[in-house]
């Protein structure tokens, strides 16, 4: 059959060969799964750091960090990059947070997920509505919390995890950069595709389609069109 693809294609094999090579790959995939289990076990054994009292600002005004937990004892925060005076904030952060539309599954685990950002709360809440975020947002504009947690003003995004014992809050885990990928579903799905992310830094066969890093990411404006207050599904 004549190919109509404009890109090179993977080699075609019989079903037995395909299954054999898939089984070889599965050995590595299973090993990676077991390694991730071991990493999670080590994470559960990390010590924690007691934090001073921070005051953030939420939809209803100032709130202590311990109160952000609500009635939960565990809290995950995503520090959303914020650039003062910009209509559209970081497309990576906007796309990342747009994935988390259903967070009720955390409730049985006594946990909660919220967004913190260095933007003023009124602007932050307006942006939340514009791009269709569902989780709670808090401003750290007047608090050292953002910088202390690895996301200073004008730069930086991060995930942090906290444990509350009464009114005392402890920091238990942190990651940033590509460490946040493990917590999303976008790249894991894209990495399953034959052509992958199509970004030049990745190891791909010769001739595989490529574009500049970030070119395949949805823009903040496009996310707002799809999920924001003015979208069809809003």
Image: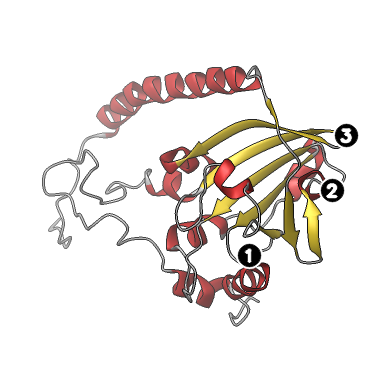
- Report the residue at 58% width, 59% height from top: 118
Q: Tell me if 94 is positioned left or right of 140 in this view.
A: left
Q: Quadrant of residue 2?
A: bottom left
* Mark 2 surroundings within 10 Å by alpha-carbon count, few (fewer than 14), some (14 through 19), many (20 or more): few
Label located before the other in sequence (3 or 1): 1
Q: Quadrant of the C terminus?
A: bottom right
Marks 3 and 1: CB-CB under 8 Å?
no
Q: Residues within 10 Å of mark 1 (few under 14, many from 20)?
A: many
Q: Position of residue 159 (x, y in %)?
A: 57, 42
Q: Closer to us: mark 3 or mark 1? A: 3
Front: mark 3 or 2: 3
Q: Residue under circle 3?
A: 166
- Closest to the observer: 126 or 222? 126
- Mark linked to residue 70: 2
Q: Earlier in the sequence, mark 3 or mark 2?
A: 2
Coordinates of residue 55 in the picture (x, y in percent)? 75, 51
Separation (CA) of disc 3 from disc 2 = 11 Å
- Which disc, if any, is residue 230? none
Q: Which mark is residue 133?
A: 1
> In the rendering, at what x and y percent does residue 179 appear?
46, 37
Q: Is residue 70 above or below residue 89?
A: above
């Amino acid at each position: 059959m004549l190919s109509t693809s404009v890109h090179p294609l993977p080699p075609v094999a019989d079903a037995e060969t395909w299954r054999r090579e898939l089984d070889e790959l599965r050995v590595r995939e299973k090993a990676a799964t077991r390694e991730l289990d071991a990493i999670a076990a080590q994470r559960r054994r990390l010590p924690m750091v007691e934090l001073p009292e921070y005051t953030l600002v939420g939809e209803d005004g100032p709130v202590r960090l311990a109160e952000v937990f609500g009635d939960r004892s565990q809290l995950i925060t995503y520090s959303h990059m914020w650039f003062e005076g910009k209509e559209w904030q970081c497309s990576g952060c906007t796309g990342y947070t747009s994935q988390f539309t259903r967070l009720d599954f955390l409730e049985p685990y006594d946990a909660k997920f919220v967004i913190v950002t260095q933007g003023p709360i009124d602007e932050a809440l307006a942006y939340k509505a514009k791009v269709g975020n569902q989780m709670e947002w808090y401003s750290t504009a007047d608090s050292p919390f953002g910088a202390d947690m690895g996301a200073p003003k004008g730069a930086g995004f991060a995930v942090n995890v906290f444990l509350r014992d009464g009114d005392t809050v402890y920091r238990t885990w942190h990651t940033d950069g590509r460490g946040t990928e493990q917590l999303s579903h976008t790249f894991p799905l894209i990495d399953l595709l034959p052509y992958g992310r199509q970004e030049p830094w990745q190891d791909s066969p010769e001739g595989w389609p490529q574009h500049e890093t970030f070119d395949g990411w949805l823009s903040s404006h496009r996310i707002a069109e799809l999920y924001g207050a003015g979208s069809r599904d809003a």
